[in-house]
Image (spheres, rainbow, N blue to C red):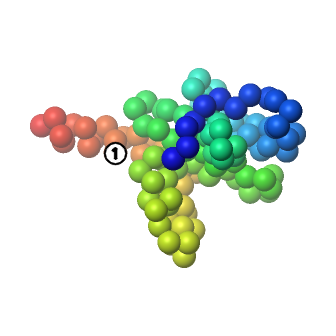
Amino acid sequence: MSNPRHHSNTAQDSTSERECQARAEAFLVELIGERPEDLTWDSDHHLQGHVHVGRRELIVIATHDPSHAPVVLDAPTWDAVRHSDASERRCLIALGAITDHDRLVSVLAADEQGRQLVAA
């Protein structure tokens, strides 16, 4: 995995990338309920962002096409997608995508329940 870091607005940046990132960030604000404080854009994959919500890392994939919503996955799902065959990726993304606040709450609650089981 490449090193996530904040991607600054340099001459290398295209307006299109910044617009895609801005749409993805707006989607995250809707999903999380506030502006993410630690959103960073990958230095190699400019449309791949990383953010933490609670103890969970989320990966946001910005889309080039404004008619498609950004994709938000938790880190384990993203890892599974990255290591899957091309024929499996769409299905894994569809099953694991965090598309609304209720799904985010569910993912975070499952994470907390897992920690409680380990501590017991």
| Residue 99 location (% of width, % of height) | 58, 51
Camera-side residue of 38 and 6: 6
Position of 37 relative to 31 (above/below): above
| Residue 119 location (% of width, % of height) | 16, 35
Left or right: 51 as drawn, with respect to 66: left
Point 78% across, 53% down: residue: 64
Q: Dot 1: what SS?
A: helix
- Image mark count: 1
Q: Is residue 102 visible?
A: no
Point 54% across, 55% down: residue: 97
Crowding at dot 1, Cα within 10 Å, few <14 / some 14-19 / many 20+, comes out as few
Furthest residue in direction left, as rendered = 120
Position of 52 relative to 2 (above/below): above
Q: Is residue 54 visible?
A: yes
Point 74% across, 57% down: residue: 68
Left or right: 65 as drawn, with respect to 57: right
Return the residue at label 1. 110
Q: Amino acid at mark 1?
A: Ala
Q: Quadrant of residue 107?
A: top left
| Residue 35 location (% of width, % of height) | 64, 27
Left or right: 3 as drawn, with respect to 7: left
Image quadrant holding the C terminus, namely top left
